[in-house]
């Protein structure tokens, strides 16, 4: 069982012990910071990928949705733009797969982020900040 989070727990609106998805309870989600193009993998399940596009546009390619389902449920990944430049961060689906009906999603504003979850045939956006 995970440690309680302030303002959370049984009977509250947020109980971390009830989190579903691919990230196993007790697993620490990795945080990756990159300026380069990155092919995200199932190893990034539950991860925050921080992208610094200060010097150039950046493309972050998602893994194949069909090959990404894991034993504990679907893989969930958050990709966030951390710089204030005019460059963009593009999140690209694998091959002809889609992210909510489109092959790409573009982040242009600093501190903006998308959380995506694999549905087995593509990716669903479950949060946009």
Image: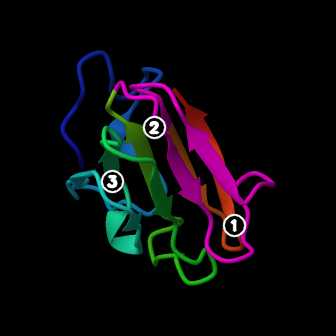
Left or right: residue 9 compared with residue 18: left
* Distance of label 1 from label 2 (alpha carbons): 26 Å
Q: Is residue 42 visible?
A: yes
The local secondary structure at tag 1 comes to loop
Q: Is residue 45 above or below residue 43?
A: above
Tell me if mark 1 has few (under 14), some (14-19) or many (20+) residues whose alpha carbon lies within 10 angstroms of its own.
many
* Distance of label 1 from label 3 (alpha carbons): 18 Å
Of the numbered discs 2 and 3, the one sitting upstream in the chain is 3
Tell me if mark 2 has few (under 14), some (14-19) or many (20+) residues whose alpha carbon lies within 10 angstroms of its own.
some
Q: Is residue 122 above or below residue 85?
A: below
State the image coordinates of residue 88 (x, y, percent, origin top left): 50, 40
Q: Are marks 1 and 3 in contact (CB under 8 Å)?
A: no
The local secondary structure at tag 3 comes to loop
The local secondary structure at tag 2 comes to loop
Asked which quadrant contains residue 18, the reply is: top left
Q: Could you say which disc has been placed on residue 122 in the image?
A: 1
Q: Could you say which disc has been placed on residue 76 in the image?
A: none
* Distance of label 2 from label 3 (alpha carbons): 23 Å
85 is within the stretch colored magenta: yes
Of the numbered discs 1 and 2, the one sitting upstream in the chain is 2
Q: Which residues are magenta?
A: 84-113
Q: Is residue 19 visible?
A: no
Q: Residue at x 33, y 62 (%)?
A: 24
Q: Residue at x 35, y 42 (%)?
A: 53
Q: Nearer the viewer, residue 4 or 106?
A: 106
Left or right: residue 1 compared with residue 58: left
Pointer 2 residue: 87
Pointer 3 residue: 47
Q: Residue furthest bottom?
A: 67
């Amino acid at each position: 069982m995970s440690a309680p989070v302030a303002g959370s727990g049984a009977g509250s609106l947020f109980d971390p012990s009830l989190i579903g998805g691919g990230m196993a309870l007790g697993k620490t989600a990795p945080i990756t910071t990159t300026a380069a193009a990155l092919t995200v993998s199932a190893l990034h399940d539950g991860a925050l990928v921080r992208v610094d596009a200060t010097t150039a546009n950046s493309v972050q390619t998602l893994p194949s949705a069909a090959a990404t389902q894991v034993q504990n449920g679907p893989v969930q990944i958050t990709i966030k733009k951390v710089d204030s430049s005019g460059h963009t961060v593009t999140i690209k689906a694998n091959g002809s797969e889609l992210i909510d009906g489109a092959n790409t999603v573009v982040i242009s504003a600093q501190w903006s982020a998308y959380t995506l979850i694999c549905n087995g045939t593509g990716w669903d956006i479950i949060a946009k900040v």
